[in-house]
Amino acid sequence: MTQTPAEHNENVSQAGGSNETLLADLRDIMASDLHAEDKLNDIVKLTANHLDVDVCSIYLMRSGDVLELFATVGLKQTAVHKTKLKMGEGLVGNVALHASPVNVENVDHNPNFVSHPETGEGAFKSLCAVPILREQKARGVLVIQSKQEVIYPQKTIELLQTVAMVLAEFAASGDLISRNELTLLSKPFKKPTQLNGQTFSGGLVMEQAVVHRAQASVKKLIADDKDKEKKRLKSAIAGVDAAIENLITSVDLKRHPEMVEIMESYQMFSKDKSWRTKIEDMIDQGLTADAAIQRAQNEIRHRFENIDTPVLQEKVQDFDDISNRLISTLNENDNKDEKHPDRFILVAKSLSPAALFDYGINKIKGIVLTGGSPSGHISIIAKSLGIPVMGQCRDASRYVRTGDQLILDTDNHVVYINPSDYVSDLYGARLEKQLKRQKHYRKFRDQPSVTKDGAHISLQMNAGLSAEIPLLHEAGGEGIGLFRTEISFMGRSRYPRVIEQAAFYKNIMDQTDGKPVTFRTVDIGGDKPLPYFKSPDEENPALGWRAMRIIMDRPAVLRTQTRALIMGAEGRPLRMMLPFVSDVSELDQAKKLIDMEFKRAKQRDIPLPEKFELGIMIEVPSLLWQLDEVFRRVNFAAVGTNDLKQYIFAADTRSGAMQGRYDSLSLSMLRALKQISAKARAHDIDVSVCGEMASKPLEAMVLIALGFKTLSMPAPALGQIKDTVISMDKGKAENYIDYLLKGGGSSLRKKLNSFAMDHKIKL
Ligand code: PEP
Ligand code: MG
């Protein structure tokens, strides 16, 4: 008959006394002079007795990813060192593979069960196993089994996890498995030379790797004095709080006001009551403060590891980071002396914004993440600082070691690990060329952006954070053609108030020194969720409740943002742009809301902008058949080629299997773009392009030839595009494109490339 968890709990507490006694007994075993294997034997006996179970066994990981039975009570002793399981084999092998516990009441019926008759395990019906984890990797498995069918309670699993923590340190000591073999264990057998990932922030870098320490090491697990441990915890929390406070007020962070908000929300984690109570409970059970923090850390990781929601993942990272900081503080900053090179690529499973500042932002030349998302905090910050980031590089933390030479090439979504001389030389030459080019571009920073035949092309910058604005002046942009306001919303823990938004917009305008800024109203939803703004669960968010659709249902979003923009402008000219409009009726509705805010400001004597211009983004294909109506209603427009391309081809060409599948220089895209620019000209409306196309030289040449007079792009691309502009003859390119558009074929890239070569246009 199956026992209930309550019944089992009852038995457990009757059998072996409190958890505190178990931990005290464990400490005695570990401190004894016994031989290492005898200590293991005593640990299995103690655990089985304490939990009142029939079997307790320890499997340890050996080289070759094999789990070997090292000690048991209840299984046949003859199986010790004979029974070996491959990683992923049977229930125990699966625990190691997924680094997470199993709790099974009827093992014979479990699809993962694989019988090992030599152990005599046939008599046991239920099994509970937890991984022996060190640095987030399974170094073994601790198993209990019972003859009765029983679902072991959470309390038992937690207890096993505590014993497993002790075993993890023991297994790493070199007393059970030789140091040589342990070194082998932490190394992969065959190191791949390249890994693929997703580009979160573009760029090319070649530097040595620094692998971010995933988990601070805990030196002492079992406490001598509970009260002392609680005091240690309290002072560590106070110390970490003070360190974050210092960081918030530091010069480094002051330069990045949006990041202060991120750090403040992060600081709240150390004040989380339930988390603190949990740690204190574990101290009461006999763990040191360090071990209790790590137990809570492992539990949170485990609970959320299969939940892919980016917002939750970020929270787990923050908890992780706070836990590591606390453990390091308790160990008097044992990694404080870690020296890092002056320039490096940081490799991490996950990373909190605070960690970036700890390493020193100026030293980090690239970031490789095993997970992450393009809209995560790290991606946003790195992008604004021009640091390339490759995310979803799944095996990076498994294969990369600190000191490895890395090449991070986001154009080709690849990371090379200790590349061959051939690859190094190739990239070395590319980097040298890149450097020379940048020097060359700097020379004509202040030169007008005019084609050979006299057409002025306004080159502007895309931005989203105040930290990016200095780049506008450094790169010589004529203005900000696209300011993505949602980025500052994404880094926050709550919806920003009107006065906060207004102060932010004012700061942007102050910094731009009179150069025009086009503020795009929030493009939220879809791939840009806000942590605090509940969106419906949608099967296909790219086609769902996003930007203008949200505003139609929640008019306050646009009204408050307009209010803040009017306030922030303080009478200066204001350009506002609406994203993701699918129908003119949405534009009409939005205009009404904006008008209301202008009236409201007038009534309250708030200075109105001396000039107000309203624009719209053309990025949903339905607008292509409403262009006359659109251009009659707006002062300007901008084509979002990223989304336009995605919806024209019905493919997200920026990631996965669709990456690179359809060409922007295809007949369908170019005809659509031509249609937009011709209609805009007929209505005398300035229409720009602010999607990725504008930042690529060949594409920029084509856009100019199609009649676009303003191109907006990330700051680093401005120099190269100016080189293209001043080396081309717009009239000649226009004639050639008109000729091509009359013909057939799909991609026109090859022909356009040959044209550029023949006419010595700099690409
Ligand atoms: C675009 O879609 O091209 C665009 C500029 O908007 P975003 O990339 O911010 O969606
Ligand atoms: Mg867009």
Image: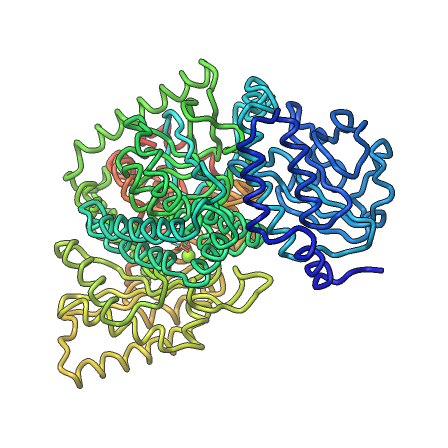
- The residue at the point 38 percent across, 39 percent down is 202
The quadrant of the image that shows the C terminus is top left
The reply, left or right, for residue 497 in relation to residue 376 is left
Point out residue 176 in the picture as x, y percentages from the top left corner: 61, 24
Residue 621: image x %, image y %?
Answer: 49, 61
Viewer-nearest residue: 448 or 468: 468
**Residue 487 location, quadrant:** bottom left
Give the residue at the far top of this rendering: 421
Is residue 180 found left or right of 275 in the rendered image?
A: right
Identify the residue at image location x=17%, y=37%. Answer: 445
Locate residue 144: give its quadrant.
Answer: top right
The relative height of residue 395 versus residue 604 in the rendered view (above or below) is: above
Name the residue at the bottom extreme.
Answer: 603
- Give the quadrant of ligand 2: bottom left
The residue closer to the viewer here, 709 or 651, is 651
Residue closer to the observer: 5 or 701: 5
The residue nearer to you, when weighing 253 against 721, is 253
**Left or right: where 41 falls relative to 530:** right
What is the x, y in percent for residue 658? Answer: 57, 44
Is residue 172 something one can see in this rendering? Answer: yes
The residue that appears at 17% across and 45% down in the rendered structure is: 473
Q: Quadrant of residue 435?
A: top left
Report the quarter where the N terminus lies: bottom right
Query: Is 38 above or below relative to 495?
Result: above
What is the x, y in percent for residue 304?
55, 54
